[in-house]
Amino acid sequence: MNRPENLKQLQDTSKIWDIAVIGGGSSGLGVALDAISRGLSVVLFEKADFAKGTSSRSTKLVHGGVRYLAQGDVGLVFEALKERGKLLKNAPHLAHNQPFIIPIFTAKDRFMYSVGLKVYDWMSGRLSLGKSQFISKEETLKRLPGLKPEGLYGGVVYHDGQFDDARLALNLAQSADEAGTCVLNYVSVNSLVKNDAGKINGLHVSDKLSGKKYQVNAKMVVNATGVFADKILKMDNPEASKMIQPSQGIHLVLDLDFLGGKDALMIPKTRDGRVLFAVPWHGKLVVGTTDTLREKPKLEPEALQKEIDFVLETAAGYLTREPTRADVKSVFAGLRPLARPKEGSTKTKEISRSHKVILSESGLVTLTGGKWTTFRKMGEDTVEYFTQVTGEKLKKSKSLDMKIHGATNRVPAGHWGIYGFDAQPIQDLVNENKAWAEKLHPDFPNIEAEVIWTVREEMAVKVEDVLARRIRMLFLDAQAAIDAAPKVAKLMAEEMDKDEQWIESELADFHKTASKYLIKNNPK
Ligand SMILES: Cc1cc2nc3c(=O)[nH]c(=O)nc-3n(C[C@H](O)[C@H](O)[C@H](O)COP(=O)(O)OP(=O)(O)OC[C@H]3O[C@@H](n4cnc5c(N)ncnc54)[C@H](O)[C@@H]3O)c2cc1C
């Protein structure tokens, strides 16, 4: 992925793209991937970095949604289980089979969860990741050594997928780019262009790094901006009423030994009726989440004290070693789009987890809701509107079996796994400069060559792009990421031919963002 080359494509003012996508999260990238699989020409604009929004802040599960099954949303679960199975095949370097254990305290719960999860197994059919089963109290404690034994009756094991969300977004951008999509980060859509009939036929965009502005022509424009969808709908129609009410979910990252073992813990019903997960991820434990209404959409939402306390207290109810604020390595928050209450009503409603595609009079196609797991199907359903919007024929989607950039059957060991087939070329960079074999931080396996690679091949242009979304250190240990930042900035400056002033301003920017992931900087 070459940013300057892709920007050059915008200079051709006579070019008419089939589809222009606004938003480089899972939804927008799913649209781009599906559209390119049908031979359409596609341009995608992300105003920050790929997955800077909600798509880097998920619980990291590729799941059918056991919870939605309990709510009777069978169609959604079938769809998600199929997508789950396909994603594990198409991106084996990023998504893997993860066993989960639900602690059981009564015979009634044993019966209820055993039966429910058998249905879940059956629904995944040939794409099943393994059978669910009841295990004894002893076996449960052997597999989850950190679990409190008091009152425990046993456990039910079931299987779902787990993945690296921001890396998948990046590899999707690479896959789309390699197939011919013009993908661009740090390019913001500022307004929509309409013809005399009021139909959208283009966009005004600006490169946030150089300030340069462009006008882009497109037959169909897709609004895939997550919690920012209202802003684009307002660009289309200033009278449009607000659709989205953001709801925040936070995660705390702890050392893995709070739970121990390789299995994840799933608590089906916390005191606020939500599900709580504690999932091993890149050698740490990710615990969450919450559901707190927020007024405004934000790219960098912050965890609230009551959310941090809630997750710590709930986790402490199940873990022998009760976690405290001092144990939190990183805290991150993400926003889900809820449907705003209609006038006169006070109730918010979660946009059904099955996504929605809305076609405006102007031809603007808005994709909203859904989840990471179903990004591809969401993309497919959105691209299906192409004929209705343009009157042109559409080829069949081929995205279901498209291998994602990095996919390999021989996933490299250790932290190299997430790079898939790129792992070897990254390690080979050390032949160009021996110093690049140095570690970025003593507690992490990542080496300097990875920074060089992300700049050359993965469109990383800011220190945060590397530490937050290319190597995930900010999400795993915020202080370690802050400590590693000067080294990363220096390497990037050399590779990108930037001066001392750039380094200083990058470090100031990174520090501002990263301090929000440190628990000590969150309100007490
Ligand atoms: C706490 C939490 C946990 C979750 N856990 C899971 C999970 O485990 N598994 C799962 O399947 N799903 C999960 N989800 C759901 C999943 O994360 C979301 O459905 C998904 O990430 C939404 O992606 P998106 O692309 O719609 O939005 P976003 O990722 O927010 O992307 C929208 C993008 O649009 C860009 N943008 C906005 N305005 C403009 C503009 N004017 N010009 C250009 N770009 C613009 C933004 O910068 C942003 O990057 C979770 C969600 C939350 C909140």
Image (cartoon, grey):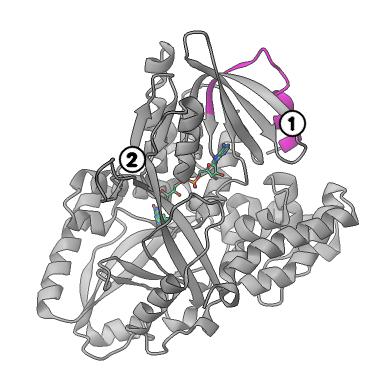
Residue 14, magenta (yes or no): yes
Q: Which residue is identified by label 2?
A: 355
Q: Is residue 357 above or below residue 481?
A: above
**To which residue does mark 1 refer?**
5
Q: Give SS at disc 1.
A: helix
Q: Write the residue at 24% across / 63% down.
A: 131
Where is residue 421 drawn, in percent x and y?
61, 50
Dot 2 amino acid type:
His
Residue 383 vs residue 395, the one in the foreground: 383
Q: Where residue 286 sits in the image (x, y, percent)?
A: 46, 70
Numbered circle sitting on residue 480: none
Q: Is residue 515 magenta?
A: no
Residue at the extreme front of the image, as rendered = 344
Q: Secondary structure at mark 2?
A: loop
**Among the two numbered marks 2 and 1 on one chain, the one whose residue lies closer to the N terminus:** 1
| Residue range corresponding to the magenta coloring | 3-20
Crowding at mark 1 (Cα within 10 Å: few <14, some 14-19, many 20+):
few
Q: Is residue 491 visible?
A: no
On-image quarter of the N terminus: top right
Residue at left offset 78%, top offset 55%: 429
- Residue at horizontal 34 percent and vertical 60 percent from the top: 160
